[in-house]
Image: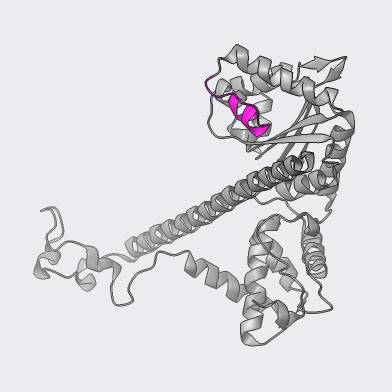
Amino acid sequence: MYEAFYGLSSKPFQLSPDPNFYFGSKQHRRAKAYLDYGVLRNDGFIVITGEIGAGKTTLLRGLLDSLNRSNVVIGNVVTTQLDAEDTLRMVGAAFGVRVKDAPKSELLMTLEAFFVNQVTQGKRCLLIVDEAQNLTARAVEELRMLSNFQFANQSLLQTFLVGQPEFRGILQKPEMEQFRQRVAATCHIGPLDEDETQRYMEHRLKCAGSTGKPTFDHDAFPAIHKASNGIPRRINRLCDRLLLLGFMQGRSHLTLADVKEVLRDIAQESETPRHSDVSPLDSVPARLPDSRPAALDSAPGALDVAKLKLSVAEVDGLSSEIAALSADHHTDRLQRLERSMMRLERINLQTLALLQKLVDAVKQH
């Protein structure tokens, strides 16, 4: 919408993951090094954790794009609260193996035969499990057992586990000791610091074809970092709205005041909408229990605030409770939005995997 106004070739702050916009922060470079190491080792588990929107999927897609798909067979699993056997069925389905209604013993033999067949064709199998924090202990154990499959001293399956920070806590449980011994590398992607936030924004603008526009006041960057907590997806959301504001006002230079205005707009949009002519107190029923103050009886159908005779402390207390409820609602709204984006990311990954399988099938014919 605003790309032409700023002279951009694409949208710089889109919410969907795009490896073309990969930004190598200190933590992302470290995570990428672990992934590269894991790919070369072709054995065991690689564990990547990070906050929602920290860039785990972008990093992973960048790695997958760098692989030679002609000799790597990739299975993607997005976990939900599944039991151990259903998790195995999800693994089979991810690799296109027919596992419907098969007993567990047959399921394991079918998977092993598939992996052996791929290795004999000079291919390797890579399993990617997203939302790994939803795995049960028994499901993790089943994945560990799959890593036991070998052919001529070569591991048949390598697994990347990608999840939110709580997955790190799950792995520290005593019953995870055997699994921890199979983990080749693990790393956590945290938020960007203030300097990285500025460089992240400038990097994405450059990738989108910026030749100098838009520009920002220096004090806008700390405000963006503070509001987003350094989480890339939150930075994208805020900056996208910021560029839209500049476009609507015909300005390519954006200030701290613009950042504050966008933050106010986002906060207002997250509030519960209500008709401007309706007071929140209008919803109070005309008749209340007998324990109410007598002053209320004189106003059936409406509430006369002046007759409540509330003390200053009581009014302040009510105001604090209302403010707390509003803040809680705002937080819940943001969490719902982030969960929606996660679902979209999962759909995108599954769609890409399906398209890749179709392309591979066409090439074979």
Residue 272 to residue 153: above or below: below
**Residue 299 falls left or right of residue 237:** left
Magenta highlight range? 89-101
Let me know if residue 31 is in the magenta part. Answer: no
The image quadrant of residue 88 is top right
In the rendered image, the vertical position of residue 138 relative to residue 295, given as above or below: above
- Residue 82 location (% of width, % of height): 54, 28
Q: Which corner quadrant of the image does residue 105 belong to? A: top right
Residue 134, given in percent of the width and then of the height, sits at 58, 33
Residue 276 image point, x, y percent: 33, 76
Residue 128 in sight here: yes
At horizontal 51% and vertical 52% (from top left) the residue drawn is 336
Tell which residue pokes out farthest to the top in this image. 105
User: Which picture quadrant has residue 196?
Assistant: bottom right
**Residue 98 is one of the magenta-drawn residues:** yes
Q: Nearer the viewer, residue 78 or 169?
A: 78
Residue in the image at 78% along x and 20% along y: 116
Q: Is residue 298 above or below residue 125?
A: below
Q: Which image quarter holds the C terminus?
A: top right
